[in-house]
Image: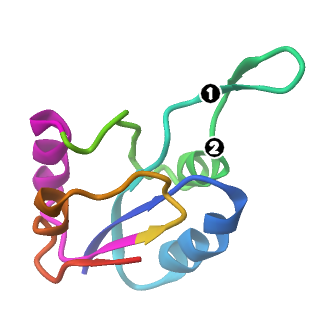
């Protein structure tokens, strides 16, 4: 199956790792945009993004999923199923309808 994953914090990393280790094709990973972190307030990638980059998996970081551009980007992956773990954004009905088999949270 073609599966995009969505998540942001450390809590979502084991689920993404299991998905990456599976026989399924992880077509993309959705996570929050990089944010200032630490004392220096430098831009930092989320733990989910760091794992995706280690596995050469495309990373998408839209601010909102309600935009036509974000929805077209997701549809372009032709997903069968979307796995969401602690993503931090509410998926609008238009996004929930894109994967052929829906979304699992």
Question: Nearest the camera: 97 or 50?
Answer: 97
Q: Which residue is mark 1?
A: 35
- Give above or below for 60 relative to 55: above
Q: Is disc 2 in contact with disc 1, using a CB cutoff of under 8 Å? A: yes
Q: Secondary structure at mark 2?
A: loop
> Which of the two labelled residues, at mark 2 and mark 1, occupies the earlier sequence position?
1
Question: Nearest the camera: 81 or 20?
Answer: 81
From which residue to which does the magenta span run?
67-83
Tally the marks. 2
Q: Which residue is mark 2?
A: 46
Q: Residue at x 67, y 50 (%)?
A: 47
- Give above or below for 40 relative to 80: above
Report if residue 66 lies within the magenta region: no
Q: Residue at x 50, y 72 (%)?
A: 20
Colour treatment of the image: rainbow
Instruction: Please provide percent x and percent y for residue 98.
Output: 11, 65
Q: Secondary structure at mark 1?
A: strand
The quarter of the displayed image where residue 68 is located: top left
Report if residue 68 lies within the magenta region: yes
Mark 2 is surrounded, within 10 Å at the Cα level, by few (under 14), some (14 to 19) or many (20 or more) other residues, namely some
Instruction: Please provide percent x and percent y for residue 93.
Output: 15, 63
Instruction: Please provide percent x and percent y for residue 38.
Output: 85, 26
Q: Residue at x 90, y 20 (%)?
A: 39
């Amino acid at each position: 199956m073609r599966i995009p994953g969505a998540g942001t914090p450390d809590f979502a990393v084991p689920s993404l790792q299991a998905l990456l280790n599976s026989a399924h094709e992880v077509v993309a990973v959705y996570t929050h945009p990089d944010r200032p972190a630490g004392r220096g307030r430098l831009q930092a990638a989320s733990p989910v993004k760091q794992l995706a980059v280690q596995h050469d998996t495309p990373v998408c970081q839209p601010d909102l999923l309600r935009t036509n551009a974000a929805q077209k980007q997701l549809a372009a992956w032709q997903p069968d199923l979307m796995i969401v773990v602690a993503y931090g954004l509410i998926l609008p009905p238009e996004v929930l309808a894109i994967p052929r088999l829906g979304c699992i949270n």
